Image (cartoon, helix red, strand yellow):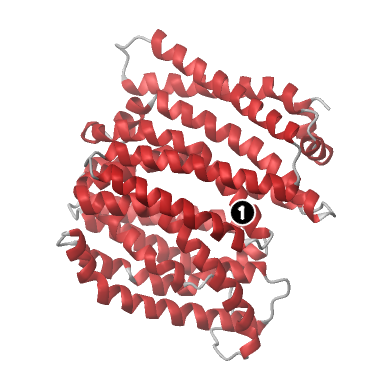
Amino acid sequence: MAVMARLLDPADFGLVAIANVALRFYSYFSQMGIAPALIQKKTLTDGDVRAALSISLGVSSLFFLLAVLTSEFIGSFFDMKSLALVMQVLALNFIVSGLSAISLSLMRRNSKFKALAIIEIISYVLGYGVVGIGFAYSGAGVWSLVAAFLSQMIVTAILSYSVVRFPIKFKHAKEDRKHLINYGGSYSIVGFFEFLFCNIDALIIGKIMGATTTGYYSRALLLANLPVQHPANILTKALFPIMSSVSNELDKQSISVQLSVLLVGSYAFAVSVGVYLASSDIVRVLLGDKWLESIPILNILTFSVGPVFVHHIISVTLNSMGELKIKMLIQIPTFVLLAILIILAAQTEDVLNIALAVVVVEWVRVCIFSWVIIRMLKIPVKNIIKIILSIVVVIMTTGGLIYAVQHLVSKDLSVTIILSVKIIFGTIGLGLGLFVSRYIVYQLPAVIYLADRMPVFAKIMRF
C-alpha cells in the first residue's frame, strides 16, 4: 500500500473503489450465499457440492454478463470515462470466484485455517507485491490496481483448488440445491443490505465529489480499519473451537459474545484512539505527502472503528443462531437513516460531514444490535458494565501514553521515528490497560470459563 500510494494518484484508487462498490451490488447475489450455506449445512454430500458448483458458476456467469452490459450506464452516472472499461475487466472476477468459492468454503468447513492463511498471503504478495507494484512502476496507472486484484483472485482460485479438490461435475438432484438456495438466498439478501450500509458513503462521494476525493476517503477508511480487521478475525476464529465445547447453546453464545466483545472491543477501541492521535504521522509515513487531505477524514472515521467491530461480533453470532430476520429488521431502518444523513451531508459538498454521518449511524446501529443480543442471550447488566469499564481503562492507558509522547518527543526528529515511538508507547499502554482491567473482569463467568480451558490465559489472569 505504501509503495503503490506513491506510484499512483488518489484518483486511481478512487476509480477502482467506485468500480468495486458498483460490482459488489451484483456480487452479493452472484454467489447466492453458497459459501456460508456449504459451511452451515450439518451433513454434506457429493450432490451438495455439485449443486453448489452448478449454482455458483451459473449465477456468477449471469452476473458477469449483467455487469458488462450495465457498465456503460454506471460510467455515465458517475461521469467517469474510464469506469466502464475498468468494471468490465474487474467483472471477470465473478467467474473466478464462482469456482474458488467451493474450495474455500470446504476449507473453512474443515477448519483448514492454516492453509487459508498461507493462500491469502501468497496470493496477496503475488497479486499486489509483484504484479501490482510492477505495473504501477511501469506507469500503468489505474490498471495496476486492476491487474493486482485479478491476479490475487486467480492465484487464490488455483491454490485453493490444489488444496481441496472436488470433481467438476454438475449433475445433482433437486433436493441437493434446496437448502443451498433457501439459506443462501436469505443470507445474500441480508448481506446486500449490509453492503449498502457499508458502501453508500463511497457511492455518494464518487457521484458528487469525483474520483480524487473518493480516493482520499477510501484510503482513510482503510487506514482506520485495517489495523483491527485481521487481529479481530484471528481472535474470533481462535475462540470458536473453545466455545463449541459448551453443551448449552445459549450459554455458548453468551460466553462467546462476552469474550469476543471484551477482547476485540478492547483492542479495536485502543487502536482507534492510537490512530486518531497519530493520524498525521501515519499518513505521511505510509502514503506520502500527496495524501495529506485524507488526514482529517481519517480523524473522524477512527470514531467508527470500535462500533464496526463490536457490531461484527454480534452479527456473526446472529448468523450462527440463524436469526437472519432480526438482522434484516435492524439493517433496513438503520440503512435508511444512514442514507438520509449522508444525502443531507452531501448537500454541503464536504466529505468530512459524510464521514461524521457514518460515525453517528455506526454508533446507533451497534447500540441497537447490542440491546437485541443482550435480551436474546439474557446477559446480566453487571457483566456489560464490567466489560465497558474494562474497555474504557484500556482506551485511557493507550491514549494517555501516546498523548504524552506526542507532547514530549522532539518535533525535530523524523516523522518515521516519531511514529515508531508512538507505536511502542501505544503498545505499552494497551498492555498496561489489559493488566489493570483484569481486576475488573476476573469474576466474569466467560473469563473463568476461558481460563479453565486455556492455561496460558489463566496464568495471565492469575487464576
Rendered-image quadrant of the C terminus: top right
On the image, numbered disc 1 is attached to which residue?
A: 316
The image position of residue 141, as x and y in percent, is: 20, 53
Q: Is residue 233 visible?
A: no
Using the image as rendered, state which of residue 44 and residue 250 is in the foreground: 250
Q: Secondary structure at mark 1?
A: helix
* Quarter residue 79 falls in: bottom left
The image position of residue 32, as x and y in percent, is: 50, 73
Rendered-image quadrant of the N terminus: top left
Q: Residue at x 25, y 31 (%)?
A: 292
User: From the viewer's perspective, is residue 230 above or below residue 119?
Assistant: above
The image position of residue 244, as x and y in percent, is: 77, 54
Q: Residue at x 34, y 65 (%)?
A: 23
Q: Is residue 270 visible?
A: yes
The image position of residue 99, as x and y in percent, is: 48, 74
- Left or right of 280 in this view: 277: right
* Quarter residue 417 falls in: top left
User: From the viewer's perspective, is residue 333 above or below residue 181?
Assistant: above
Q: Amino acid at mark 1?
A: Val
Using the image as rendered, state which of residue 295 and residue 207 is in the foreground: 207
User: From the viewer's perspective, is residue 423 above or below residue 15?
Assistant: above
- Left or right of 369 in this view: 344: left
User: From the viewer's perspective, is residue 60 above or below residue 189?
Assistant: below
Classed neighbour count for the residue bearing mark 1: other residues with Cα under 10 Å, few (<14), some (14–19), many (≥20): few
Mark count: 1
- Left or right of 285 in this view: 314: right
Q: Residue at x 53, y 21 (%)?
A: 398
Q: Residue at x 24, y 64 (%)?
A: 86
